[in-house]
Image (spheres, rainbow, N blue to C red):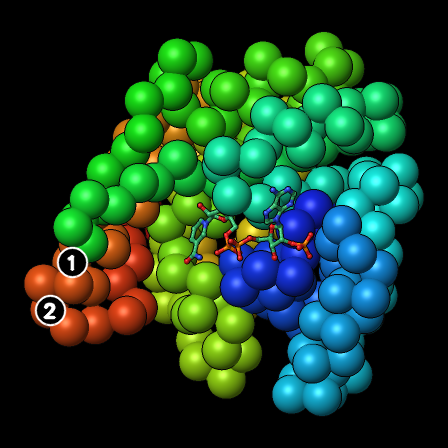
Amino acid sequence: MQLGIIGGTGTEGRGIAMRLAAAGVPVILGSRSLDRAASAVAAILASAGTLPIEAATNGDAIERADVVVLSVPFECVGAVLDAHRFRFRQASLVIDVTVPLVFAGGTPSLAPVAEGSAAEFVRARLAGAVRLAATFKTIPASTLGRLDAPLDCDEFVCGDSIEARDAAVALLARIPTLRPLDAGGLDAARTLERMTALAITLNKRYKARAARFRVVGLPPL
Ligand SMILES: NC(=O)c1ccc[n+]([C@@H]2O[C@H](COP(=O)([O-])OP(=O)(O)OC[C@H]3O[C@@H](n4cnc5c(N)ncnc54)[C@H](OP(=O)(O)O)[C@@H]3O)[C@@H](O)[C@H]2O)c1
C-alpha cells in the first residue's frame, strides 16, 4: 500500500504521517510546494529517526497513492478537490480528516455545510469510483505527533461503503495503542465533527491539550 497526504505539512498531516510510517506504511507527504514538503519530511526524520516518508507535491502524492488522506483546512477543500479531482486513481480510497470548525471568542462550533458534514461535502466532489472514509477527526494533531506517547484511545471511522470503512479500520489498526471503531455510514461524520469541537471545549475547560475519546461497554475487538 502507498499512502499520500494532501496538506501533509500541517500539524495534522505530519502527525498522521508519523504514526502510520512508524507502523510501516510508506507515506508520501504532499504540499503545494515541494520545498515545504521536503522541509517537513526533514524535520520529522530529524526528530523521529528513519521512517518511510518522502516529500512530493500534492498532485504527485495523489497520483502515486492508493490511499489519499485529505488534510487541509475545510475552507479550501472545494478548491483543492476541483484542482486535483482527476488525479485520483480509480478505486483509490480517500480518507477525509477535515472538520469545518469556526471559533467565536475562542469557542469552537461547526460552520454550516449544506451536505451535512465535511465528509459528505467531500463525497459530493469526488468521482464515483473513488471510495471515501472519514476518520482521524477526534484525536488532537499534537497528540498524534508525539510518537513517544501512547494514544490509548479509540478513533471513529465512517465511510461510504463497508469496503471503505473496513480498509480504513485496517489501516488505523496498524497503529499500536489506537482502537479503530466502525461508526457506520458517512452521515456519522455529522456527529464525529461535533465531537472535535467537544474535545476542544474540554481541553479549554480543563486546561489540557490531549482530550480524546474511549468507548466503554463494547465486546473485545
Ligand atoms: N489540528 C488538529 O488537531 C486536527 C484534529 C482533527 C482534524 N483536523 C483537521 O485536519 C485538517 C488539517 O489540520 P491542520 O491543523 O494540519 O491544518 P493547517 O496546518 O492549517 O493546514 C494543513 C496544510 O494545508 C495546506 N493548506 C493551507 N491552506 C491551503 C489552501 N488554501 N489550499 C491548499 N492547501 C492549503 C498547507 O500546506 P502547504 O502550504 O504546504 O500546501 C497546510 O500546511 C483540517 O481540516 C482540520 O480541521 C485537525
Residue placed under numbered mark 1 in the picture: 202
Between residue 221 and residue 41, name the one nearer to us.
41
Quadrant in the rendering for residue 125: top right
Q: Label 2 is placed on what type of residue? A: Tyr
> Tag 2, which secondary structure?
loop
C-beta proximity under 8 Å, tags 2 and 1: yes
Which residue in the structure is indicated by mark 2?
206
41 vs 103: above or below: below
Few, some or many C-alpha atoms within 10 Å of disc 1 (few <14, some 14-19, many ≥20)?
some
Q: Which residue appears at 39% of the width and 61% of the height?
A: 140
Quadrant in the rendering for residue 69: top right
Residue furthest front as drawn: 105
Tell me, for residue 17, which label it has, or none: none
Pick the residue in front: 80 or 123: 80
Closer to the camera in the image, 207 or 133: 207
Q: Position of residue 66 (x, y in %)?
A: 81, 39
Q: Residue 27: image x %, image y %?
A: 77, 59
Q: Residue at x 46, y 62 (%)?
A: 141
What residue is at 79 percent from the left and 56 percent from the top?
Answer: 33
Q: Amino acid at mark 1?
A: Leu
Residue 138 percent location from the top left of the image: 37, 50
Q: Residue at x 57, y 35 (%)?
A: 76
Q: Is residue 165 visible?
A: no
Q: Position of residue 55 (x, y in %)?
A: 83, 63
Report whether 25 appears left or right of 217: right
User: Where 63 falls versus 145 (above or below)?
Assistant: above
Q: Residues within 10 Å of mark 2 (few under 14, many from 20)?
A: few
Whole-angstrom CA distance, mark 2 to mark 1, is: 6 Å
